[in-house]
Amino acid sequence: MAASVPVPCRLSVAAVIAFLLGCCSLVNVAGIEEQAEQFFRSGHTNNWAVLVCTSRFWFNYRHVANTLSVYRSVKRLGIPDSHIVLMLADDMACNPRNPRPATVFSHKNMELNVYGDDVEVDYRSYEVTVENFLRVLTGRIPASAPRSKRLLSDDRSNILIYMTGHGGNGFLKFQDSEEITNVELADAFEQMWQKRRYNELLFIIDTCQGASMYERFYSPNIMALASSQVGEDSLSHQPDLGIGVHLMDRYTFYVLEFLEEIHPASQTNMNDLFQVCPKSLCVSTPGHRTDLFQRDPENVLITDFFGSVRKVEITTETVPLDPHLEMVDTRLSVDEVATEPLKYTEQLPVAEIIHQKPKPKDWHPPGGFILGLWALIIMVFFKTYGIKHMKYVF
């Protein structure tokens, strides 16, 4: 006759097994959390960009082109329009002095239209003010404002802030009627940090005496770059006789050329960005500040700010597919591919455009040449016939 196990013993064995299973599940959860933390070791899960042109009037064409060029680059690297706040103080594409309406070019060969056909401007014309800019940064937007006018970042967001315009020692002009100081900008960044609106922030400014704008920063996790030191001018670049103005500023031009070589999986770091425009090219002396930034710039990828986060985990496990799932042919026909318009972010790369030879232009005699020719004809006439024959001419 088989021996029976007492009921209390069986209950205690079951309790021990349940306890061990609970411990194993806790270990698994802890392991998953540790794996997830390792997976997101860069510290951010989303990217935002705030791109600001503060200048009006036709002769500031280059500042609009600067901003649109950076806008084109961050979109190409993956940041969607929903995560970009674009502020343009003037609409150069629709300016009556623009010989090529609905376009803004950043190179004198006029091959790269940075305005394109899908630009989403969030703040335009007189909406670009110091007050609105500070409200965007600090999140103090009226409830009636649409989502496109908001910076909906959080403590896992890496934010790129690019500004261009006319400035001086400790200030940047808005609309030629007001200005933002370096103290106001520093306090806005501190509010962002206190309100957990960013994880890391990259500030780039292309203006005269640009380094003065980051001197007062005191909030953590901010890296700043400027096109010129205090007492220096930030110079323009790419003059175009057809348009009649300079098309870009030197610093942004070389930054754009550098970004054209970057792709979403690039391992290029911020130290490489610091070297893109030496004084021999920019004429001014670009500066940068990294003392507030916790990570070593050598370990910070360019795509941590200019690109969109793409977290991918490679697995060796087999994923079963439904055998009854019909294959859907999503390939486009030849006619559809041929007629589909090319987006402006997919145009000819800037690196190729820069090294192209300028297009030959139609020759027209200068105005002084025609005047000189008429003067020569009159002189020959007087020397040959004298004044007495003038009555036969008139």
Image (spheres, helix red, strand yellow):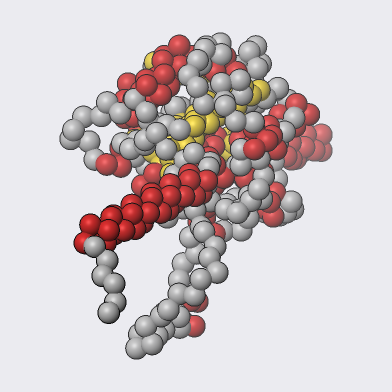
Between 276 and 252, the residue placed more toward the observer is: 276
Question: In which quadrant will I find the N terminus?
Answer: bottom left
Q: Residue at x 50, y 22 (%)?
A: 220
Q: Position of residue 304 (x, y in %)?
A: 54, 42
Of the 4 image quadrants, the one containing the C terminus is top right
Q: Left or right? Give the position of 105 relative to 153.
A: right
Q: Position of residue 4 (x, y in %)?
A: 26, 70
In the figure, is residue 379 to the left or right of 1?
Answer: right
Give whichever of 74, 267 is nearer the camera: 267
Residue at left offset 74%, top offset 51% = 355
Count of number-bearing discs: 0
Q: Residue 208: x, y in percent?
A: 59, 19
User: Can residue 109 be seen from the camera position used here?
Assistant: no
Towards the viewer: 121 or 245: 121
Look at 57% across and 45% down and name the residue there: 303
Image vertical order of residue 193 relative to residue 91, above or below: above
Out of 30 and 158, give the one closest to the viewer: 30
Q: Name above or below for residue 236 compared with residue 65.
A: above
Instruction: Please identify the quarter of the rendering in which residue 382 is found.
Output: top right
Left or right placement of residue 50 versus residue 306 in this view = left
State the residue lying farthest toward the left. 144
- Asked whether residue 153 appears in the rendered view, the answer is yes
Query: Which residue of the protein is positioned furthest toward the front in this rendering?
Result: 1
Q: At 33% across and 54% down in the image, what residue appears?
A: 16
Residue 139 placed where, x, y %? 30, 28
